[in-house]
Image (cartoon, rainbow, N blue to C red):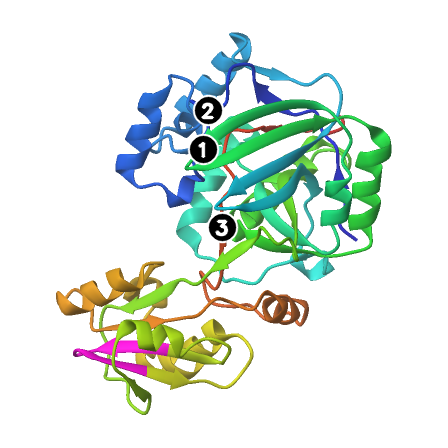
Amino acid sequence: MADVRAFRGLRYTEPLEPVVAPPYDVLSEAQVAEYRARSPHSVVRLTRPGGDYAGAARLLQEWIAGGVLARDAEPAMHLHRTEYDGHVRLDVLAVLRLVPYADGVVLPHERTHRGPKEDRLALLRATGASLEPLWFLGEGLRPILDGAPAGEERAFAFAGERHTLRRIEDPAWTGLVSRHLAGRPVLIADGHHRYETTLAHSRELDGGPEAGARFTLALLTDLADPGLLVLPTHRVLRAGVAVTGGEPAGSLDETLRGLRGRAAAGTYREGRFQVLPLEGDVPAVELHRQVIDNILGRRSAEEQLVYTRDPEEAVGWVDSGEAVAAFFLGEPDLAAVLKAAREGKTMPQKTTYFHPKPPSGMVFHVLDREGNP
């Protein structure tokens, strides 16, 4: 099903630690400035160009011409190892053929919005490169990644984590990865907007069926990898009516404990915490369907909701009068999310938050109109 291949990556020729950065959409403007200051070759100068897409394209070409970046002569996959807080996660960086969701090969699980797609499409058109990997989950990958052969390695520290990137040309192993995933669909973990954007861009280019532009840079992780952490994202409502009918809770901690192992959401309004029992398998979906959508009516969730992974921050917004209510979610059940995705159900934005995020800048993929990836 999924067409995953080795590719000729475009890579930094200098140490990675000063130039890598978090994904573009988790960076504040202050953080963008901080990462730009670390190196004249920081990846954020490409991924967050401040609307100067042509400038990002010129910079990319200057770095290639000046030897800051070099294209691999032979195709390879890249084993990515992340060590954090006593955990180890293994991923593989490869390229994935872009296909419509209707094909059932790439499974989305979150709704998208127009604004982020317009920004990323403009950047793709200008640079002609996948600058950050889209993140996908597959089944049964970890044993194959554990058995990866030796290869050129680059280690670097990032965000309190230890990363190792191993380039593997061995066609026996890269073929094993490809054949394993050819029998399975993959679930988008992070990058719904960018997947749809890159698919649209590939259609614009209309290159050959085996052209690099028909593929996107992909980081693939085993759905059951013990180092894969999925965190909840809480919702904060700017305006609306009171929520009633929940189970009283005395504190934020009591509310969060009350969400474990059950279909429920917490809420905070006017100094009171509650736990709201929900029907269904994915609490984020049911919170929107049974509660938030009814409150909002015809008003846009994109305009009326803000998101945070810090429940105390959500409470603070309500107490300050910046919002009227906060809704808390527990850790998502990935098996339930995958089941819903296979059934074609689309979930609210930010149903899942996978951690740790892969750094941007480890490798790029050139979107050639012709030739192989």
Instruction: Identify whether 39 is placed above or below 34.
Output: above
Label 2–label 1 contact, CB within 8 A: yes
Instruction: Identify whether 78 is placed above or below 239.
Output: above
Chief SS of the magenta region: strand
| 249 with respect to 5 (left or right) | left
Instruction: Identify whether 330 is placed above or below 135.
Output: below
Query: Which residue in the protein does label 2 denote?
Result: 17
Query: Which residue in the protein does label 1 denote?
Result: 158
Q: Amino acid at mark 1?
A: Phe
Query: Which residue in the protein does label 3 denote?
Result: 355
Residue 269 lies in the magenta stretch: yes
| 285 with respect to 325 (left or right) | right
Q: Nearer the viewer, residue 143 or 12?
A: 143
Q: Amino acid at mark 3?
A: His
Where is residue 131 shown, x and y percent of the image? 53, 32
Boundaries of the magenta span: 266-274
Q: Which residue reaches farthest top?
A: 66
Instruction: Identify whether 144 is placed above or below 314.
Output: above
Q: Residue at x 41, y 70 (%)?
A: 329
Q: Mark 2 and mark 3: span between their CA atoms?
A: 19 Å
* First in sequence: mark 2 vs mark 3: 2
Where is residue 339 shown, x and y percent of the image? 65, 70
Identify the element where label 1 is drawn: strand
* First in sequence: mark 2 vs mark 1: 2
- Image quadrant where residue 103 sits: bottom right
| 19 with respect to 334 (left or right) | left
Q: Residue at x 21, y 78 (%)?
A: 269
